Amino acid sequence: MIFRRDTWSEILSSVTKNKARTTITVIGVLWGIFIYITLSGAAKGLDNGFERQFERVAMNSMFVWTQQTSVPYKGFKTGRFIQLKLNDVRTLKTKIPEIQYVAPRNAKGVFGGDAPNITKDLKHGKYNVYGDFPVVVKIATKDIYDGGRFLNEEDIKHDRKVCVIGERTQRELFNKDENPVGQFIKIDNSYFQVIGVHKFVQGGGFEDDGDIYIPFSTFRKLYNTGENVGWLAIAAYNDADVIEVEKKVKTVLKDIHSVAQEDERAIGSFNLGEIFNKVQGFSKGLTFLSLVVGVATIFAGVIGIGNILLISVKERTRELGVRRALGATPNEVKGQIILESVFLTLVSGVLGIILGALVLAGINAATQDVTDFPYTNPTVPIPYIIGALLIMIILGTLIGLIPAQRAVSIKPIDALREE
Amino acid sequence: MIAIKDLHKSYKMGSNVLHVLKGINFNVEEGEMVAIMGSSGSGKSTLLNIVGMLDLLDTGSYTLDGVPIVNLNETKAAKYRNKFLGFIFQSFNLINYKTALENVALPLYYQRVPKKERDEKALQYLTKVGLANWATHLPSELSGGQKQRVAIARALAAQPKVLLADEPTGALDSTTSYEVMQLLQEINDEGKTLLVVTHEEDIAKMCKRIVQLKDGVIIEDKKVNQIRASEYV
């Protein structure tokens, strides 16, 4: 019956010739699916937005630094300052297999202390200087403008006096059309050759657009830091539990530096992975909420269809009686009502999807240039749409059963007698 | 064509049982045009409904064109109605959102006749009742007489064995009534069996046989000289 062309043209004629009824019916479900699509699309957009905010850094990364001890241990009294050493990196990597990358970093000017003086010809300013290993880009991506590069292993090996400068540094120290790459700037009292300019990206933590990166080994010589490390940037493998890794890192470091395990203050950390998980949890919750609300609204819409069909069956009692007198079997009448229900649900569903998609596209266009608001590419995954359509077909059928049953429960003779 | 033996039918009205038909014996031969008369409450509509398989009999037997009508469920009844019977109602009962042509084609739709053939046949019957030019009109755009003629075309479309007309002229003025009766007579002339329920004497006299019902029994069953409706028109 479903596959007879006639069945559908019969349904189409019955549906299109009762325009007011059809319109009202359609609006109910259309609204439901529209809410569903827009909500889950918006939630996805927010999700994507958060992800974009975090895409610059490895999502399971953390920073670890040292502070003063708060618990006396092994004969040391409290208030002792702990110093991270380069050797710690190797120890961490061997003892904790979940760690993918460790980047020891030093900096001047970031956490207290004066930023170094940077001079280029007659221009000068104070900018933060970082001593870095090339591996740091695995943890926090650095985009380098064309023609330049980031630090590499050779730079470290030969203690090269090279640097990567920021966009702002370039703007403030160089002339407008001057290519900084290959030129020399003076960091405190040494000349460094510029090898690249990094693009500043929002959301990179405490770093900014004036930062200068030099090889770790050069930094160490320049500022006489020896084996000392300012802090560690650590990235765990994707499948590792970051919170667990963080705990292990702290345990190992406390071991190395003779700090009591119960000392909460000696080693500080900032777990991006944990924060990311929280944000992700939030957006997951939001997605879930939008699904629940959307599906509930679809439900309401479909129930509306059932309601209107029920009324229309009452209205059409006579017509259905005539049809049965002319030879329509109860199943044919039932089938017609159910298919009308499914048809209306589907048509309004598809219209709602189209409308929702248009609205999402509009929102997307409007938020295209907004960078400080986490909202990117609001899309609804295809499975969600298919799921919604399935729900609509099933609900449409189920809800159509009620008026259909009602339609055949009236005897044709009573239907015809009704004035 | 129709053979009814010892037919009883009663309705439950709350705690009362209303015995409507009390033993009807009634035969109709092919090509007959029978008027069933009686005052309201005489059971004439109930009889027609049972003949039309819109209602079930309590006891007795009913045979239509040699087929015993027993164990009737709704699906079976629908098939029989579609195959054997054409209905003409007092209030026409056209489907208001369908055109005259679509209304006539509807029984053919339930016979699963392909669309093209359906429309051809429907138009043929509309032509027969003189409404070919009104094929695309909705019932609301037709006069009462025209509506009844569309209904007659619809009843004929499925090529039934018997036409059942329940007060076919009840909602029409006398001129239009005679026109409709003339059409029914012409259909009967072609050999179709007709059962007409009416309480109007002049309409009954246009049939070939009058069956009088009173309080659920047949009190009179006589052949009459048919008065041609064309004499009045």
Image (spheres, coloured by chain):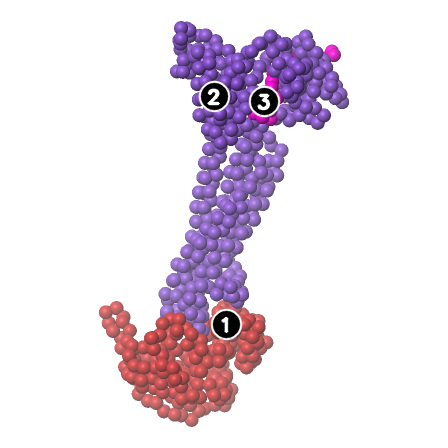
Chain colours: A purple, B red
Q: How far apart are marks 3 and 1 (CA)?
A: 76 Å
Residue drawn at the location 58% of the way across and 9% of the way down: A225
Residue A161 placement: quadrant: top right
The image shows residue A23, relative to residue A361, as above or below, that is below
Query: Mark 3 belongs to which amino acid?
Result: Val
The image shows residue A5, relative to residue A23, as above or below, that is below
- Asked if residue A150 shows in the view, the reply is yes
In the rendered image, residues at marks 3 and 2 fall on the same chain: yes
Q: Which of marks 3 and 1 is in front?
A: 3
**Mark 3 surroundings within 10 Å by alpha-carbon count, few (fewer than 14), some (14 through 19), many (20 or more):** many
State left or right for residue A232 relative to residue A338. right
Position of residue A194 measured from the top left corner of the image (x, y, whole percent): 70, 18
In the rendered image, residues at marks 3 and 1 fall on the same chain: no
User: Which residue was labeled with disc 2?
Assistant: A95
Asked which secondary structure carries label 2, the reply is: helix
Q: What chain letter is assigned to the residue under label 1? A: B
User: Which residue was labeled with disc 3?
Assistant: A136
Query: Mark 2 belongs to which amino acid?
Result: Lys
Q: How far apart are marks 2 and 1 (CA)?
A: 79 Å
Query: Where does the magenta region start and end?
Result: A121-141
Asked which secondary structure carries label 1, the reply is: loop
CB-based contact (under 8 Å), mark 3 and mark 2: no
State left or right for residue A172 relative to residue B221. right
State left or right for residue A149 relative to residue A255. right
Query: Mark 1 belongs to which amino acid?
Result: Arg
User: Which residue was labeled with disc 1?
Assistant: B112
Position of residue A233 measured from the top left corner of the image (x, y, whole percent): 54, 21
Residue toward you, B47 or B42: B47
